[in-house]
C-alpha cells in the first residue's frame, strides 16, 4: 500500500514571494506518478503539476515547479511569484502506473496555503 | 471549470437513511472515480467505474455502491448512513481507466448526517 505524508498543515507567504510545500511518500512500486492538486475555497480540485517517476527531469508549469527526489521519496512543490489566487489547499497525491485497471489517487492530508497581500 | 458536474450541492440526512449522489462526466470521458473527503483530510478513493463496470475499489464497506450509465454518468449510493459518512463526496472523470489519463474533478456534494 502507498502512503503520502504532508507534515505542514498550514503555510503563509507574502504576495510575489516564493514558497515551497513539502511531501514525502512511501511505496514499493517502481513505476508511478506524483501529483500536486489545488483545492480553492470553491472546492473544485484542479491539477497543478504531474511528475512521472521514470523521468529524472523535474516537471515545471509556469510559476510551479517540483523537486522530485526518488531515492528519498520526496516531492516538493515550489510556487514562484505567489499570487492571491494561489490561496488554497494543496494536496500531494500518488498513483501507481497501470495499463487500465484501478487508476486510483492516494492523497496526503493537504496543506492550507495563504498568500498575504 | 472542469466540465464535471455533481448534484446535489448539499444534502442533509439522518442516520440509517439512504442517499444517492450523482455525477456527470466530462464529454468524451468513459471513466468515473468517486472519493470521500472528510473535513480537514485528503480525499480517499471509494471506487472507479470504467465503461459501466466497477474497475477497482478502496477500503469502503459494501453499503457504498455505485452505478455507471451508458452515457457514462454515475451514481454513488450509500445505505444505512452513519455519522462518519458526513463528508464532501467528489467524483472525477477521465478519458480512460489508465493511469495516463488525467482525472478531472467535480465541485463535490457536501453530505451531512445527523
Image (cartoon, helix red, strand yellow):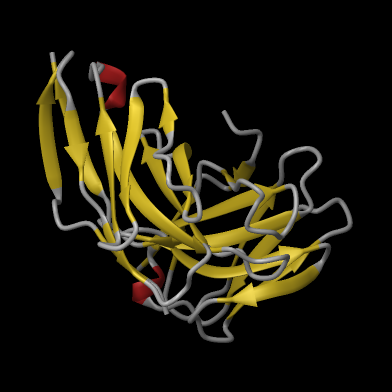
Give coordinates of residue A63: x percent, y percent: 34, 21
Q: Which residue is depicted at the point 29% across and 41% down?
A: A89
Q: Name the one closer to the observer, A84 or B36.
A: A84
Q: Which residue is depicted at the point 65% across and 52% down?
A: B100
Residue B48 visible, this angle: yes
Image position of A10 (left or right of A80): left
Displayed quadrant of residue B87: bottom left
| In this view, A71 is above or below A68 | below
Residue A45 visible, this angle: no
Q: Which residue is depicted at the point 40% across and 78% down?
A: B82
List the single residue furthest toward the bottom.
B62
Give coordinates of residue A42: x percent, y percent: 39, 33
List the single residue furthest toward the right.
B70
Q: In which quadrant is the N terminus of chain A drawn?
A: bottom left
Q: Name the one closer to the observer, B108 or A84.
A: A84
Q: Which residue is depicted at the point 41% across and 20% down?
A: A62
Q: In which quadrant is the C terminus of chain A drawn?
A: top left
Total labels: the figure holds 0
Q: Name the one closer to the observer, B108 or B96.
A: B96
Image position of B65 (left or right of A20): right
Q: Name the one closer to the observer, A62 or A56.
A: A56
| In this view, B76 is above or below A50 | below
Give coordinates of residue B85: x percent, y percent: 41, 71
Amino acid at each position: 500500500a502507498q502512503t503520502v505524508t504532508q507534515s505542514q498543515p498550514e503555510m503563509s507567504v507574502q504576495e510575489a514571494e516564493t514558497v515551497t510545500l513539502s511531501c514525502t511518500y512511501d511505496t514499493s512500486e517502481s513505476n508511478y506518478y506524483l501529483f500536486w492538486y489545488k483545492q480553492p475555497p470553491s472546492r473544485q480540485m484542479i491539477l497543478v503539476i504531474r511528475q512521472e517517476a521514470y523521468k529524472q527531469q523535474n516537471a515545471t508549469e509556469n510559476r510551479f515547479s517540483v523537486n522530485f527526489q526518488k531515492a528519498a521519496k520526496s516531492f516538493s512543490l515550489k510556487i514562484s511569484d505567489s499570487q492571491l489566487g494561489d490561496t488554497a489547499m494543496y494536496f500531494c497525491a500518488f498513483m501507481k502506473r497501470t495499463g487500465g485497471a484501478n487508476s486510483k489517487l492516494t492523497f496526503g492530508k493537504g496543506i492550507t496555503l495563504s498568500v498575504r497581500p | 471549470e472542469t466540465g464535471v458536474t455533481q448534484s446535489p450541492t448539499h444534502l442533509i440526512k439522518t442516520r440509517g437513511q439512504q442517499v444517492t449522489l450523482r455525477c456527470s462526466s466530462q464529454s468524451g470521458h468513459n471513466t468515473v472515480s468517486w472519493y470521500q473527503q472528510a473535513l480537514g483530510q485528503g480525499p480517499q478513493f471509494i471506487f472507479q467505474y470504467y465503461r459501466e463496470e466497477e474497475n477497482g475499489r478502496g477500503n469502503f464497506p459494501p453499503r457504498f455502491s455505485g452505478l455507471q450509465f451508458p452515457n457514462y454518468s454515475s451514481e454513488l449510493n450509500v445505505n444505512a448512513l452513519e455519522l462518519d459518512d458526513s463528508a464532501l463526496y467528489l467524483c472525477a472523470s477521465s478519458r480512460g481507466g489508465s493511469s495516463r489519463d488525467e482525472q478531472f474533478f467535480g465541485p463535490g456534494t457536501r453530505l451531512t448526517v445527523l
